[in-house]
């Protein structure tokens, strides 16, 4: 059974940085695609960054240059580094893992950016 656990969220001041982590168990991290989503209060989850099984990365245009996704296969972890944090970056961040047509979600980690 695949399980994901996000961590690294917290309260930060605008302009600061955070690195969110997503730890995968029950599957080899490089066998599937990992994606990060952002959900603001009252809104739907929005895709922000992804990394394929082969290691190719993509980040949506609106956060390119501030958000970076990376993977440490030895640690079974995927990271989302967020720089120059702004209040609109606040919300829950979720990772998901796509493997053989199945999607597994983590429970999310909360990020709050104070102005």
Image (spheres, rainbow, N blue to C red):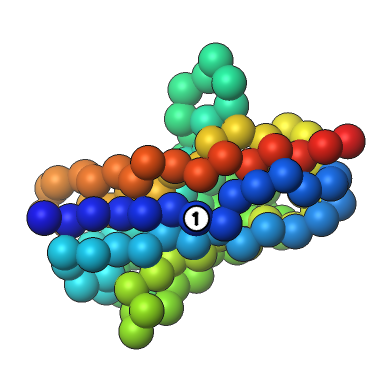
Nearer to the camera, 50 or 107: 107
Q: Position of residue 111 (x, y in %)?
A: 63, 42
Q: What is the quadrant of residue 24 in the picture?
A: bottom left
Q: Is residue 56 above or below residue 62?
A: below
| Residues packed near mark 1 inside 10 Å, few (<14), some (14 to 19) or many (20 plus) | some
Residue beneath label 1, please? Answer: 7
Q: Where is residue 19 in the image (x, y as percent from the top left)?
A: 62, 62
Can you say which quadrant of the picture contains the C terminus? top right
Q: What is the quadrant of residue 67 in the picture?
A: bottom right
Secondary structure category for the residue under label 1: strand
> As drawn, is 87 to the left or to the right of 82?
right
Q: Residue furthest top?
A: 42
Q: Is residue 75 visible?
A: yes
Q: Where is residue 5 in the image (x, y as percent from the top left)?
A: 36, 54
Residue at x 37%, y 41% (from the top left corner): 107
Tag count in the figure?
A: 1
Residue at x 17%, y 67% (from the top left corner): 27
């Amino acid at each position: 059974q695949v399980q994901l656990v996000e961590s690294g969220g917290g309260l930060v001041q605008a302009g600061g940085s955070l690195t969110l982590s997503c730890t995968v168990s029950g599957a080899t991290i490089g066998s599937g695609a990992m994606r990060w989503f952002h959900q603001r209060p009252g809104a739907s989850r929005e895709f922000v960054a992804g990394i394929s099984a082969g290691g190719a990365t993509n980040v949506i245009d609106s956060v390119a240059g501030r958000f970076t996704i990376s993977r440490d296969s030895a640690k079974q972890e995927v990271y989302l580094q967020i720089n120059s944090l702004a209040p609109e970056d606040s919300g829950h961040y979720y990772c998901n893992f796509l493997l053989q047509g199945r999607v597994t979600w983590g429970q999310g980690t909360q990020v709050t950016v104070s102005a």
